Amino acid sequence: MTGKEETGIFTLYSDVEATAVRWLWYPFIAVGKITLLQGDPGDGKSTMMMNLIAELSKGGTMPDGKSIGMPQKVIYQCSEDDASDTIKPRLETCGADCRNVAFINEEMNSGLTLDDERIRKAIIQFRPRLVVIDPIQAYLGSDSDLQIAGRARKLMQRLGMWASAYDCAVVLIGHLNKKEGTKDLYRSIGSVDVVAAARSVLQMEHDPENKDIRIVRQIKNNLAPSDGEIRFSITAEEGFRWLECKIPTDSEAESEPPKFESKSEKAAYLIKKLLSEGDMRAREIYMRISDEGISRRTAENTKKELGIRSYRKMRQWFWSIKPEE
C-alpha cells in the first residue's frame, strides 16, 4: 500500500440515488434513453414522428389522449427531404409550432454524423425534450459503421450518454434489412449492438387486411412491459389519423394535474411530486420544472417555503423532502 488511496475509481451502489424511469410516451419512448423506430421504406415512420412532434411542439395531446401541458422543444434531423419545401410544409400541415422545432445545419464544416459534437452542442443550446434522427443510415461516417460491432457500440454509447446527461429522449429511425423470416430484432440495420443500446424498439408494418393502416409493435422494452401497440392510418381523403394506442394494463397513467392560480402554487405541486419518489439532484429538478414554465428563482423561493433541505453528495447538490436524520 502506498498510504494514499486513489479516489474516484469506483462508486458504491449504496451511494447511488435510485430514480424512476421518466416517459415522454409510456411505454414507447423514455426520457434519457434511445428508442429505435424501424420499418420498411415508405411505411410512414417519418409521418408518424412528424405528427407526434407537432403535438409536443404545441403542448397538445399524446396519441393515447393524455395532455402534454407545456409545449416541448424538438430537434428533427432529417436528411432525406428539404427543410423549406418538404419538411416545414409537412410540419405545418400536422399543426406544429415550428418555433419549437429545430434542425442542425449540416452544410457547416462537413456532413453530420451520429456521434458529431454538434449534436451535443445543439442539445445544450436548444434544450429539446426529443431528438429524432431520420434515418440513422444517413448519419454514419461510412456504411460499415453499424456493421462493425465495436464502432456501433461506441456510437450508441455516446448518443445514449447525451440523452441521459441532457434529459431528452432520442428516437432513431431506421430501415429494416431484407432478411425476411428472421426474428424481428435481427432485421434491424447493422450490428446487434444497435438494438442492444436501444431501450425500446418499435417495428412498423402494414395491416395485412387494410393497406392504409399501419401497425407499430413494440418488440423490445427494457423499462416496462413490451406488449404495447400503436395503429394509425394514412389516406388520401383524411391524411394521417391516430386510430388506437394499446398500452399494457399496468400503465403508469397519472391523473390530470390540478389547476393552479399562481406559478408558486404550481412549483410547489411539481417539486413535492418529484421528491415524493426520493431525493433528487437539484440540477434535474430545475430542468424538469423549467419545462413547465417555472423559473429557477421561483423554484428557489418555493423550496424555502416548503422547508426542503439541500445537501451535497458526490460533488452534486440534492434536494430532500425528508427530515434530516
Image (tube, grey):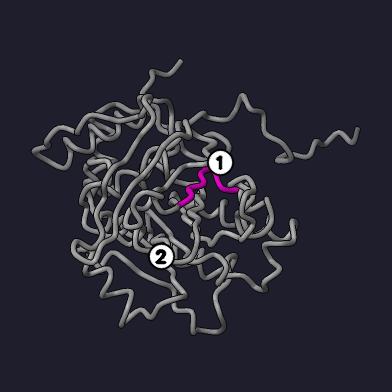
Of 165 and 198, the residue lying toward us: 198
Residue 11 x, y percent position in the rendering = 67, 33
Which label belongs to residue 125? Answer: 2
Instruction: Give the x, y percent position of residue 199.
Output: 54, 43
Q: Is residue 3 left or right of residue 251?
A: right
Q: Is residue 209 above or below residue 222?
A: below
Residue 202 is covered by the magenta coloring: yes
Q: Is residue 27 left or right of residue 115?
A: left
Q: Is residue 53 above or below residue 285?
A: below
Classify mark 2: residues with Cα within 10 Å, few (<14), some (14-19) or many (20+): few
Residue in the image at 74% along x and 61% along y: 148
Residue shown at 68%/51% (left/top)?
192
Q: Residue 232 or 180: which is nearer the viewer?
A: 180
Q: What type is the residue that disc 1 sits on?
A: Arg
How many callouts does the rendering have?
2
Q: Which residues are magenta?
A: 196-204
Q: Could you tell whether 200 is left or right of 292 in the image?
A: right
Residue at 39% over, 50% down: 207
